[in-house]
Amino acid sequence: MIQQIKSYLNFLKNSSNQHGVHSPFVYSLITKCFYDKKKYVEYEILNQYRKSLLENKNFIEVTDFGAGSRVFKSNKRQISKIAKTAGISPKRAKLLFRVVDYFQPETILEIGTSLGLATSAISLGNKAAKIISLEGCSKTQEQAQLQFQKSNFNRENIKFINTKFEDYLLNCQLNTEHCQLIYFDGNHSKKATLDYFEQLLPTITNETVWIFDDIHWSKDMEEAWEIIKNHPNIKVTIDTFQWGFVFFRKEQEKEHFIINPRKNFSTYIFQKLKI
Ligand SMILES: C[S@@+](CC[C@H](N)C(=O)[O-])C[C@H]1O[C@@H](n2cnc3c(N)ncnc32)[C@H](O)[C@@H]1O
């Protein structure tokens, strides 16, 4: 926890907004997507999806595959609590929707479905995209599928796959056509993150977008993020604290950005704290 607070203060100090960003690609992403203030009708659908899960007081027996929970002590968990703690936040879900809407990837891989809070944002961002979403816990995934049905989402383009990530990535034949955008949001450990990173490298193209969740969750994850940033195939990275964006655009200079997705937040906080 202390490490996370330190990392966040560091982030606030070092992050900026679009000013001083010379890359047109990154500038456009920040101004047209990150800071897009339009009230999309899809936001209401996302809210309803979340609300329904938060009202669900049923319990399920989950199998924990990841780096462990800092919240739950037992494997018998209430749906509403899983939605509150393990899923993407409302703000990030909107941002994820905008990112998918902005890039319009035709194929998307989500590593870590949980209750489908992020999957719903992804699928609304590009309704025609083919989406694969991986989840190891069958009971949790069942709930995601139920919620998709209940919310009348178009499920034709979404393949929910119940698998251990390791098994799927090792045995599947994913190639450049399958993963124009990948959202890495499961097993937040250094080793697993770097393993998935290496296993998925053969699928990259110049346009591929990768988003790593929780890059500052632990010292371990921060180390993984540093290794990813320094990989020779990586050209541009954007650290938004919660997420690390990765781009492979050969035409760009290698450059790392630290961008606060809340436009003037850092300046505001540091003025308040008089730092
Ligand atoms: C943080 S949650 C995903 C949240 C979801 N993307 C969202 O924003 O709503 C991570 C999920 O990954 C699953 N998971 C973690 N490690 C796994 C592994 N090695 N194989 C399969 N599933 C795993 C967990 O069961 C959990 O449901």
Image (cartoon, rainbow, N blue to C red):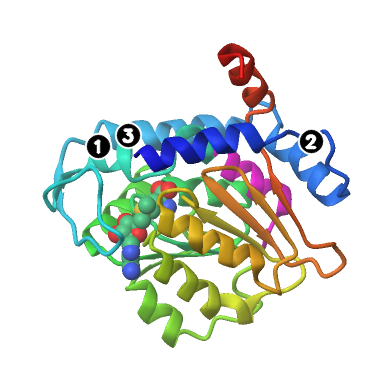
- Residue 247 falls within the magenta-colored stretch: no
Report the quarter where the N terminus lies: top left
Image point 63% across, 52% down: which residue?
A: 126
Image point 53% across, 33% down: which residue?
A: 9
Taking the image as shown, residue 28 lies to the left or right of residue 257, namely right
* Sequence-first disc among 1 and 2: 2
Residue 149 in view in this figure: yes
* SS label for mark 1: helix
Local packing at callout 1 (Cα closer than 10 Å; few below 14, some 14-19, many 20+) is some
Image point 35% across, 44% down: which residue?
A: 150
Asked whether the beta carbons under mark 3 and mark 2 sit within 8 Å of each other, the answer is no
- Name the amino acid type tagged 3: Ser
Local packing at callout 2 (Cα closer than 10 Å; few below 14, some 14-19, many 20+) is some
Image point 39% across, 59% down: which residue?
A: 188
Using the image, determine if residue 176 lies above or below residue 43: below
Taking the image as shown, residue 100 lies to the left or right of residue 155, namely right
* Sequence-first disc among 3 and 2: 2
Query: For this rendering, which residue is in front, 258 or 141?
Result: 258
Using the image, determine if residue 87 lies above or below residue 50: below
Specify the label residue 52 is tagged with.
3
* SS label for mark 3: helix
- Per the image, the residue denoted by label 1 is 80
- Name the amino acid type tagged 2: Gln
Specify the label residue 18 is tagged with.
2
Q: CA distance from mark 1 to mark 3?
A: 9 Å
Using the image, determine if residue 93 lies above or below residue 197: above
